Amino acid sequence: MINTAIEAAKAAGKILMKNYGKIDSFDTKSDKSLVTKIDMACEKKIKEIIFSKYPHHNIIGEEEGEDGKGSDYKWIVDPLDGTHNYIFNIPIFGTSIGIACKDELIGGVIYLPVSKELYVAEKGKGCFLNGKKLTIKDTSLKQSLVSFSSGYIRSNAEEAQMVAKKFLNNCFEIRVSGCAIFNIAGVLRNTFGVMISKHAKDWDISAGAVMINEAGGVATDFEGDKWRLGSRSVLAGNKTCHKEALILVK
């Protein structure tokens, strides 16, 4: 299944790069986020590839919802994470595909097409960037950059501001990229000590949660419970930063 996820993510990446810098229209969704025809085209292509190999599996896509087939297997797809960056020609965006069996995450792929970074993880087999195994290193918050979700700020600015102030007093600096999978990739590369998001959707985090666990990090919700499908917040990073950050988000 992981090879199919890689094929689908790379196919979406080709569509993204072909159309990057050419967006002249977009729509606004109910949560005030934006969507383009490219989001839809990528999701359609990903589904086409997955269903060609696994026609009876379920797929949950950000744009078209769930195609339920009654299978134990579920693919969780974000065809274009960082849509707002994409629209405004900021080269921080990509595709995420998580795989679950009976709602337990078993694998994931993240592809950042601008930098051609392909992150792949399977439960029990490790996490890899372009074939090189990744290991998350421990650092303290004081030594670390912290990645904050733009969606958290957009959905609950007052709460996010209070939490951000706590971190500003306890970490090196904060960054806001506008792309959840870029934030996850930053944790995997040891750029960020921890990433923080609230009101995150399954398609934002599912692939990354597998990766962070497989690379030796920790991914939980704000209560410290293991991140799983349906969790509404995420705190993911190296073990030391996560422990320190968990106190600040409560």
Image (cartoon, grey):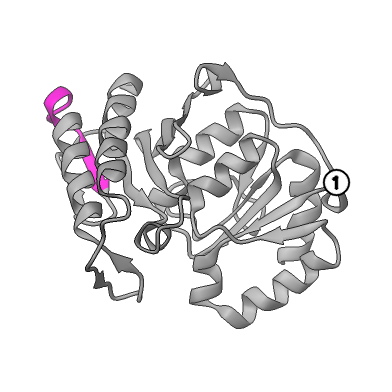
Q: Residue furthest front?
A: 21
Residue 88 in the image, given as x and y percentages of width and height: 39, 64
Q: Residue at x 25, y 32 (%)?
A: 11
Which picture quadrant has residue 1?
top left
Q: Residue furthest bottom?
A: 158
Residue 225 can be seen, yes or no? yes
Tag 1: amino acid = Ser
Magenta stretch contains residue 195: no
* Residue closer to the observer: 124 or 82: 82
Q: In the rendered image of this protein, does residue 183 appear above or below residue 11?
A: below
Residue 5 in the image, given as x and y percentages of width and height: 31, 28
> Seen in the image, is 96 located left or right of residue 38?
right
> Seen in the image, is 13 located left or right of residue 171?
left
Residue 227 can be seen, yes or no? no
Which picture quadrant has residue 176?
bottom right
Magenta stretch contains residue 54: yes
> Seen in the image, is 126 located left or right of residue 243?
left
Q: Dot 1 surroundings within 10 Å: few (below 14), some, or many (20 or more)? A: many
The residue range painted magenta reads 51-60
Give the labeled residue for mark 1: 140
* Residue closer to the observer: 51 or 10: 10
Q: Residue at x 28, y 25 (%)?
A: 7
Residue 219 in the image, given as x and y percentages of width and height: 61, 44
Q: Residue at x 74, y 52 (%)?
A: 145
